Image: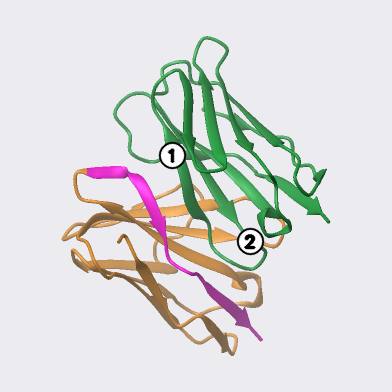
Chain colours: A green, B orange
Amino acid sequence: QKEVEQNSGPLSVPEGAIASLNCTYSDRGSQSFFWYRQYSGKSPELIMFIYSNGDKEDGRFTAQLNKASQYVSLLIRDSQPSDSATYLCAVLPSGGSYIPTFGRGTSLIVHP
Amino acid sequence: GAVVSQHPSRVICKSGTSVKIECRSLDFQATTMFWYRQFPKQSLMLMATSNEGSKATYEQGVEKDKFLINHASLTLSTLTVTSAHPEDSSFYICSAGIQGRSYEQYFGPGTRLTVT
C-alpha cells in the first residue's frame, strides 16, 4: 500500500511569515510530486510539481524534495490570509502508473 | 490553459433518481479523466479512471453499476449516479490529464450532489 502522510493541522502562521508544509511518502521509487491547494468548498488547484531532488521556486512558493528521506515540502514565503486553505500533497507511484496517491492534506491558517 | 469544467455545479435530487455529471476539458485533449468523491473534511477518494473510448477502471469498493462512467471523446467524460441514495450525497470532482503529460491532473470545479 503506497502511503502519503501529511499532518492534518491546522498550521497557524501570522501574515508575512513563512509557512512550511511537509509530506512523507512510503514508495521509495516515486519520481513525481505535486502540491495542490484546495479552498473550502472548492476543488484542488495544482500549484507546484517537482521531480528532482532539491528546491524548485515559483514566486512565493518553494517545493523541496529529498528522495533519500522520502520527504517533500512546500514553503510559502510572505504568507497572506488568502493562502489559508488545505494543501494536498500528491505522489506518483513507481511502476509507470499515472494515478497519484493523495495525502489527506494540511490545513493552513494565515492570520492577520 | 488546462481548464476543466463540470456541470452542474450543484444538484439536488430525490432518492431513487439518477443524476448525470459532465466533465469537459476546454482547451486541451484529455486522454485520461479521473473521478473523485470527497466527503466533508475528508481527503479525495479516487472512484475511477477513464480513458477515451474504453471502459472505466473502478477502484475497489466502487460499484460500477451504480456509478456509470462514459468517456466518449477526448474532451468529455460523464458520471451518472444511478438510483441515488442520501449516502451518495457528496462533492464529486473530475480531473483530466493532459495528453502526453497524464501525471499532471487539472481539476474541474466539482459538483455538489445532495440526495433527499
Q: Which residue is mark 1?
A: A100
Q: Is residue B99 above or below residue B74?
A: above
Q: Chain of mark 1?
A: A
Residue B28 is marked as none
Magenta stretch bounds = B101-116
Chain at numbered mark 2:
A
Q: Position of residue B71 (x, y in %)?
A: 24, 65
| Residue B102 magenta-highlighted | yes
Q: Residues within 10 Å of mark 2 (few under 14, many from 20)?
A: some
The residue located at (70%, 47%) in the rendering is A79
What's the magenta bit mostly, secondary-structure-wise?
strand
Under tag 2, what secondary structure? loop
Three-letter code for the amino acid on which mark 1 is drawn: Pro
Q: Quadrant of the N terminus of chain B?
A: bottom left
Q: Position of residue B91 (x, y in %)?
A: 58, 68
Asked if one can make out residue B42 in the rendered structure from this viewpoint, the answer is no
Q: Which residue is mark 2?
A: A39
